[in-house]
Structures are given as C-alpha cells and as structure tokens.
Amino acid sequence: MINMSHVGLRYDGGPEVLTDISLSLKEGSFHYLMGQSGSGKTSLMRLLHIGKLPSRGDIHFFNKDVSKLSRSKRALIRQKIGVIFQDFRLIPELSVFDNIALPLRLSGESDKAIKTDVNAMAEWMGLKDHLKMKPVFLSGGQQQRAAIARAVIAKPQILLADEPTGSLDDEMGLKIMGLFEELNKKGTAIVVATHNKNLVKAFPHPLLTLKSGELIP
Ligand SMILES: Nc1ncnc2c1ncn2[C@@H]1O[C@H](COP(=O)(O)OP(=O)(O)OP(=O)(O)O)[C@@H](O)[C@H]1O
Ligand SMILES: [Mg+2]
C-alpha cells in the first residue's frame, strides 16, 4: 500500500529530521512506531498521510509515486487514510457530530446512513451526550476519542495513529486497541506511534524504531 525508498525530510531548508528511510506497509500489516521524543515519529507520520512530501527519495501509495500526482489525486488517496493526530486536530467550528461525520460526508454517504453510523460510534466511544458540543468543551480524553472516531468511521485502508491512547485511561486504551485489532483483521494497515510499552506487550506487533531520524534495524 505504501512503499518508501531512501526517503529524507527536512523542514524549510533546515537539517534532515528523517534520513534514508525505506519501508513498506502492506495490506493487513500492523506496526508500532517507537523512538524517543524528537526522533521523528510525527514527521514520519506526516509523510505517510501526505501531509508533507519527502525532500529526497520517493514514496509510492498504491503503486503511484506521490510526488508525481496532482493535488486532486493526492486528495483521493488521503481519503483512504485515517489519521489520529497527536494534537487531535478536531475542527473547532464544527460540533463533535460533524467532526466525526466528516470522512463519511467526503465519501458521499447519505444523511441517514451518516446519522446511524455516527450515533453508533459515539455510543461505543462514550460520547453520545457530547455530539452537539464544540470540541473545546470536551476533556482531553473525550477529544482524543472524537479524533479516533473520526479516523476510523469510514473504515480506512490505512490507519495512522500518533500516540492514540496518550489521554485515555488504561481501560479505554485497551478498548481502542481492540478496535484497531478488529480493523486490522479486516485488512486495514495500521501504524501506531507510542511510548507505551504496556500496549506493545498486550498487543504484540512488529516495531519500527526511529533514532535521530533513522530507522534502526
Ligand atoms: N513543523 C516543524 N518545523 C520544523 N521542525 C520540526 C517541525 N516538526 C518537527 N520538527 C523537528 O523534527 C524533529 C522530529 O520531530 P517529531 O515531532 O517528528 O518527533 P517525535 O518523535 O514525534 O517526538 P514526540 O515523541 O515528542 O512526539 C525534531 O527535531 C523537531 O524539532
Ligand atoms: Mg510526535
């Protein structure tokens, strides 16, 4: 699904924060992305959801070189990717309902189907009393759950989760990981960036480990 070959990334002409990254994410794969703070996890995630283009090397999404695609083609690929950002990125002007509904609206679902799906998801996430609120009125953990709901609701082919359980209690963290496992069994390729060794122990999957911007074998 995604192939990176000798990729480097620098921000605004600064030093390379990712150096010579080669990796391949296949359908149904599940990886943890580990590494110290500042090692480049979020930066690598940005490349994986086309939030940034590489400054060298190439990245293929579904066998297409992303640097050679038009904006609209890139946008179509992005629709297949669910992202849980480290800082949530909920849209402040929209209600929690409308935030969660976004990917379904983009894929042209009917209002009726959207209502059913969002309500069921909110029930599962413990957010059903918060659907009409703007994100700013939610606790950190509630915002994180809304961000997770938005990322998974359209059953993406690739799910990228940057510290997805950082603001959740252990019980909710396990429940969310169970949800990821279920999606993964249905074919979604998943990358979870985390510092949480307990998660890795409870749900073992191969590790991608970054050290100062390089993947260590
Ligand atoms: N928007 C940006 N502009 C310039 N430099 C950046 C930007 N984002 C990250 N960096 C730099 O890139 C390097 C890697 O940062 P990144 O956020 O990818 O690390 P991380 O592994 O996600 O850390 P953490 O565990 O703290 O989230 C750091 O040196 C950081 O200063
Ligand atoms: Mg980060």
Image (tube, grey):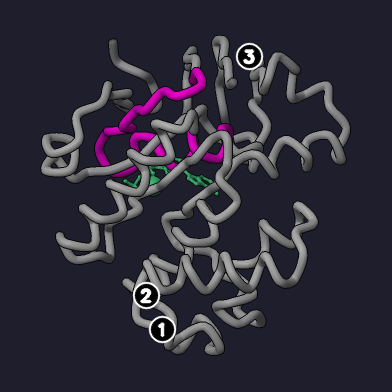
Q: Residue at x 22, y 43 (%)?
A: 195
186 relative to 58, above or below:
below
Q: Residue at x 18, y 66 (%)?
A: 169
| x then y, percent, for residue 142 | 37, 75
The residue that disc 1 covers is 138
Q: In the image shown, does 139 or 202 lie closer to the viewer?
A: 202
Name the quadrant of the N terminus.
Answer: top right
Q: Viewed as shown, does residue 148 lie left or right of 118? A: left
The residue that disc 3 covers is 57
Q: Which residues are magenta?
A: 25-48
| x then y, percent, for residue 54 | 64, 26
Q: Quadrant of ligand 1?
A: top left
Mark 2 lies on a secondary structure that is helix
Mark 1 lies on a secondary structure that is loop
Q: Residues within 10 Å of mark 2 (few under 14, many from 20)?
A: some
Q: Viewed as shown, does residue 179 lie left or right of 61? A: left
Marks 1 & 2, CB-CB < 8 Å contact: yes
| x then y, percent, for residue 46 | 56, 40
Q: CA distance from mark 1 to mark 3?
A: 41 Å
Marks 1 & 3, CB-CB < 8 Å contact: no
